[in-house]
Image (spheres, helix red, strand yellow):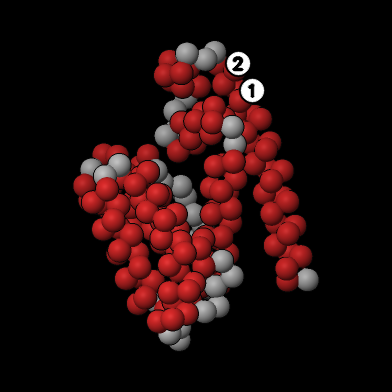
């Protein structure tokens, strides 16, 4: 089981990142601070499971995002679908952690995309908007939207393959 010193050493460096993500989701300083505090409490309660984590930062971010989504669902149920991404169910804890790492990787890759690609892809994938709806919102033609989405997906695919290759090299 992780002791207090190890816990602080591993998870406290992520505080600023966690707060930034929570604030981005919730748009409110007090709510963001509360969610970050809740996340640290959840991490502390699970400290027996945390020593074997390959990427504790990713785990903390995923836990935080899930807390933000729960908060949004409770506060504004009509908005909860905007932020959700399907994550495949897994039978074992290891498979769940791997899925979370993969999802975190894809989210990190999306953050690296040019702003326009990121915006359009989020509208298409997370908000489930049609190209026509996106065009009305952004002023882009449907042809431009298709090209932007295609380029974004290509970049994500290439960077994800690179990430997978690097991950597999760690265990070889």
Quarter where residue 150 is shown: top right
Left or right: where 76 falls relative to 15: left
Q: Are marks 1 and 2 in contact (CB under 8 Å)?
A: yes
Q: Quadrant of residue 65?
A: bottom left
**What is the secondary structure assignment of the residue under circle 1?**
helix
Q: Mark 2 = which residue?
A: 143
Disc 1 marks which residue? Answer: 147
In percent of the image, x 54 and y 13: which residue is there?
A: 141
Q: Is residue 3 above or below residue 69?
A: below
Specify the quadrant that holds the N terminus.
bottom left
Classed neighbour count for the residue bearing mark 2: other residues with Cα under 10 Å, few (<14), some (14–19), many (≥20): few
Question: Can residue 63 be seen here?
Answer: yes
Residue at position x 67%, y 38% in the image: 155
- Image position, residue 18 (x, y; %): 41, 56
Q: Nearer the viewer, residue 82 or 108?
A: 108
Residue drawn at x 43%, y 15% is: 136
The C terminus sits in image quarter: bottom right
> On the rendered structure, is 19 left or right of 101?
left
The one nearer the camera, 12 or 73, is 12
How far across and down, in percent of the image, does residue 152 sit? 62, 33
124, above or below 73, in the image: above
Helix, strand or loop at label 2? It is helix
Q: Where does residue 30 sit, x and y in percent of width and height?
A: 23, 51
Say if 30 sits above or below 90 in the image. Answer: above
Q: Residue placed at 53% from the left, 47% from the top?
A: 107
| Front residue of this view, candidates 163 and 142 | 163
Where residue 113 sits in the image (x, y, percent)?
A: 59, 36
- How far apart marks 1 and 2 lie (CA) works out to 6 Å
């Amino acid at each position: 089981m992780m002791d207090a010193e190890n816990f602080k050493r591993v998870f406290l460096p992520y505080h600023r990142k966690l707060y930034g993500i929570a604030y981005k989701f919730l748009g409110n300083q007090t709510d963001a601070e509360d969610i970050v505090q809740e996340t640290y409490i959840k991490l502390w309660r699970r400290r027996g499971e945390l020593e074997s984590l390959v990427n504790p930062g990713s785990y903390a971010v995923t836990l935080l995002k899930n807390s933000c989504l729960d908060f949004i669902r409770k506060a504004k149920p009509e908005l909860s679908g905007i932020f959700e991404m399907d994550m495949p169910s897994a039978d074992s804890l290891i498979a769940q952690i791997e899925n979370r790492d993969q999802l975190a990787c894809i989210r990190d890759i999306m953050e690296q995309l040019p702003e326009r690609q990121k915006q359009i892809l989020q509208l298409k994938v997370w908000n489930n908007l049609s190209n026509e709806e996106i065009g009305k919102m952004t002023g882009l033609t449907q042809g431009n939207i298709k090209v932007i989405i295609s380029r974004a997906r290509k970049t994500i695919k290439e960077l994800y393959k690179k990430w997978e290759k690097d991950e597999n090299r760690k265990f070889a």
